[in-house]
């Protein structure tokens, strides 16, 4: 049992044995604090939630590599994204702080500041989860008794309808963008490949004799040095036939072996952030188009397939989408005149009304 006594200095010492039988002590200025701590120690031991007070003195920056090592391993892309979020948003605030000095109020104020900075709710949630995951591991391995991330209020995520370009709008974008990237835009709005998959394509992925393109890898976003990983999902490893026009344009590039099909303007591997900032966004503005994302080119392609009558099975297989529901919930938007065209076809099929 924990016990307390008054020292010659006038302070109060609590003595107890930890679950491993090791004798420990802690001093307090006030008697009531010592008494409360003695009770809490015994309760924590009974519950199995006791942790070494010194274990929480490690700083978050020093703890993080150990937390990741003790956690389930993640894909290279996930790891790269996680490192980016940590370096930009987490370590500047919490890196220097001991684990046991990070409290719930500090975490909540940090989350509120992320929201106030204009970040999307889904982005805030991902950043927060990077901190929260490391804290859960700290609790699991007795660095902390509880996580300061428990009970934090996060911004509500509202699913926004994805945007897409009509064929005429895609043509305006192609005309407005830097000539080096015109084929890339055409390729994206026809094939629906993700930008990382496009950046990961190599010469031997296209077979001109059959017109088939194999998707086997993706270039992880802005990783340094460049890192290739598997496609986003298991269904992302796939092959698809290019149109004769697109196939001829790809073949004309003359790219062979492991050389990239699509590059930055200097011939290096595609840097997505630079492409977006220096070329894609200015082209949208020049073309007088709404502020769509690069990923919306994929959305545009799949919407075009559906509008052209592609079957459910064909859409999911060709796009590398993991399920039918995902494909049609996210991409099954009607074109402006699609409903009227459907009504006209129904009327023609059923014939004139004679009654």
Image (cartoon, rainbow, N blue to C red):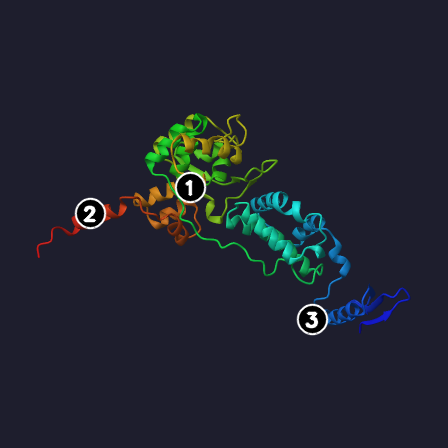
Q: In the rendered view, does 284 fall on the left or right side of 72?
A: left
For the C terminus, the quadrant is: bottom left
Question: Label 1, on which residue?
Answer: 296
Asked whether, in this view, residue 247 is left or right of residue 55, the answer is left
In whole angstroms, how far apart are the C-alphas of marks 1 and 3?
A: 51 Å
240 lies left or right of 46: left
Judge whether residue 253 can be spotted in this image. no
Relative side of 83 to 170, left or right: right
Position of 282 relative to 39 (above/below): above
The location of residue 263, given as percent across then percent down, is 50, 30
- Callout 3: SS: helix
Q: Is residue 311 above or below residue 29?
A: above
If the image is split into quadrants, where does the N terminus sit? bottom right
Tell me which corner region of the image, top left, top right, bottom left or bottom right, holds residue 40.
bottom right
Q: Say few, some or many: other residues with alpha carbon within 10 Å of mark 1 (under 14 / 14 to 19 / 20 or more).
A: many
For the residue pair 314 and 286, the one nearer the viewer reads as 286
Residue that label 3 marks: 47
Task: Check if mark 2's residue and mark 1's residue have beta carbons within 8 Å.
Answer: no
Question: Furthest residue to the right?
Answer: 8
Q: Mark 3–mark 2 contact, CB under 8 Å? A: no
The residues bearing labels 3 and 2 have C-alpha atoms spaced at a distance of 70 Å
Q: Secondary structure at mark 2?
A: helix
Dot 1 or dot 3: first in sequence order is 3
Counting from the top left corner in percent of width and height, residue 111 is at: 58, 52
x, y percent for residue 172: 36, 31
Residue at 54% over, 29% down = 268
**Can residue 330 be seen in this snapshot?**
yes
Vertical relation: 56 (above or below) 319: below
First in sequence: mark 3 vs mark 2: 3
Measured Cα–Cα span from mark 2 to mark 1: 29 Å
Q: Which residue is mark 2?
A: 344
Please tell me which residue lies in front, 4 or 62. 4
């Amino acid at each position: 049992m924990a016990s307390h006594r008054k020292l010659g200095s006038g302070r109060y010492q609590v003595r107890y044995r930890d679950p491993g039988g090791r004798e420990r002590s802690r001093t307090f200025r006030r008697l009531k604090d010592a008494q409360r701590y003695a009770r809490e120690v015994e309760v924590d031991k009974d519950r199995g939630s006791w942790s070494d007070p010194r274990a929480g003195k490690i700083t978050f920056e020093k703890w993080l590599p150990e937390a990741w090592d003790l956690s389930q391993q993640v894909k290279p892309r996930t790891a790269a994204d996680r490192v980016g979020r940590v370096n930009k948003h987490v370590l500047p605030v919490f890196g220097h702080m001991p684990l046991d000095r990070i409290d719930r109020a500090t975490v909540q104020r940090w989350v509120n500041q992320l929201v106030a900075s204009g970040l999307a709710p889904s982005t805030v949630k991902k950043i927060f989860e990077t901190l929260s995951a490391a804290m859960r591991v700290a609790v699991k391995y007795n660095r902390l008794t509880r996580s300061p991330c428990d009970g934090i209020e996060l911004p509500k995520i509202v699913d926004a309808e994805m945007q897409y370009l009509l064929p005429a709008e895609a043509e305006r974008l192609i005309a407005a963008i830097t000539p080096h990237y015109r084929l890339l835009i055409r390729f994206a709005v026809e094939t629906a490949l993700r930008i990382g998959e496009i950046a990961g394509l190599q010469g031997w992925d296209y077979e001109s004799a059959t017109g088939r393109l194999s998707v086997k890898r993706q270039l992880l976003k802005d990783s340094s040095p460049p890192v290739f990983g598997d496609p986003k999902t298991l269904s992302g490893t796939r092959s698809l036939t290019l149109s004769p026009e697109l196939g001829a344009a790809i073949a004309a590039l003359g790219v062979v072996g492991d050389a990239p099909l699509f590059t930055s303007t200097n011939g290096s591997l595609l840097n997505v952030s630079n492409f977006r900032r220096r070329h894609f966004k200015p082209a949208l503005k020049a073309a007088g188009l709404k502020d769509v994302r690069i990923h919306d080119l994929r959305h545009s392609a799949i919407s075009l397939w559906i509008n052209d009558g592609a079957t459910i099975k064909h859409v999911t297989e060709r796009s590398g989408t993991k399920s039918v529901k995902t494909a049609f919930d996210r991409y099954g938007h009607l074109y402006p005149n699609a409903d009227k065209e459907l009504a006209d076809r129904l009327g023609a099929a059923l014939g004139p009304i004679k009654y």
